[in-house]
Image (spheres, grey):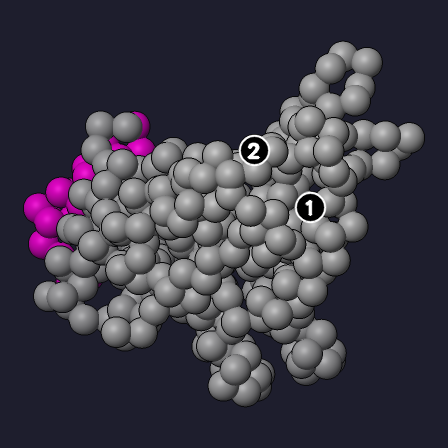
Amino acid sequence: MYKIKVGISACLLGAPVRYDGGHKRSVFCERELAEHFDFHPVCPEMAIGLGAPRPTIRLVRRDGQLRAEASNGAFDVTDQLIAFSEQKVRELHFISGYILCAKSPSCGMERVKVYGGAQGAAKEGVGFYARALMEAHPLLPVEEEGRLNDPILRENFVLRVFAYHDWQQLMGGGLSAARLIAFHSRYKYLVLSHDPEAYRALGRLLGSLKERALATVADEYIQGLMAALTRRANRKGHSNVLQHLQGYFKRRLTVGQRQELAETIHKYRVGLLPLLVPLTLIRHYLREHPNPYLEQQVYLNPHPETLKLRYSL
């Protein structure tokens, strides 16, 4: 089975690479995501020659500059971390997402402790490797393992990984105006659920294809798409899309079926039912009344059902 390639901090897969010789194994990554993702593990600190166990590294602000120093003051690895990070991230064109270890001076994507201020340690830093990764690949879905415990953040991250991989496949197969429009057609309702304004803006953008260079429009499109999907969909957004989908069946369903579907969507909107219930009903009606346009909508199946990511939405 083909698996999407995703970068990950090596300690999250159980590698004994942490300062104390231990790891931070993520059960969700190792047991569930590994069924669909081909992980590419990296430990920047081990990669620059630090062993395990080792003195802890921490971010320190000195003379306005951020440094990576041993907590006991024995050494400074700033230059080594920067050099490795800049080289490594240039090689990661093949991945579709990245899962980082939180709070790490090399891999933390936010709120890493920075020492040296008047108030002691401030949670305001970004790890050297994480910063280089996000600057080199600004569209790449990146998340920390701790935040993946939140079911909404978890679903949103995995959704973005699959969408970005889909885009990479499109570009790898050769870009054309027709293929770009077909791609957008599949993503319309997914975008609408996350950001109605982006839905309208992306439509207008593709309407300019005859007047503008295809590559330029494509670059703006994927930036807009990934930004839209980063905004988490709420009950209002999902309900809006569900009602759009409902409209495709109004002439196919009985009065009782239409009423049942409308009531199910309403109960979801007010928090009485999870998203999976109206979606399951819509998929059921779609099997009974096939519609090629709806069947291609990524919104209905943005990621494998076996991950059960929409059970808590």
SS for callout 2: loop
What residue sits 91% from the left and 30% below the top?
63
Q: Which x, y percent locates residue 272?
A: 22, 28
Q: Residue furthest top?
A: 119
Q: Please tell me whether the stretch drawn in magenta is mainly helix, strand or loop.
A: helix
Q: Is residue 299 above or below residue 153?
A: below
Residue placed most toward the observer, 154 or 238: 154
Q: CA distance from mark 2 to mark 1?
A: 12 Å
85 is within the stretch colored magenta: no
What residue sits 57% from the left and 84% below the top?
175
Residue identifier under label 1: 128
Q: Which residues are magenta?
A: 250-270
Residue identifier under label 2: 103
219 to the left or right of 166: right
Q: Which x, y percent locates residue 184?
A: 49, 69
What residue sits 49% from the left and 50% below the top?
9
Under mark 1, the amino acid is Phe
Q: Quick check: can you spot residue 248?
A: yes
Q: Which x, y percent locates residue 251?
A: 19, 61
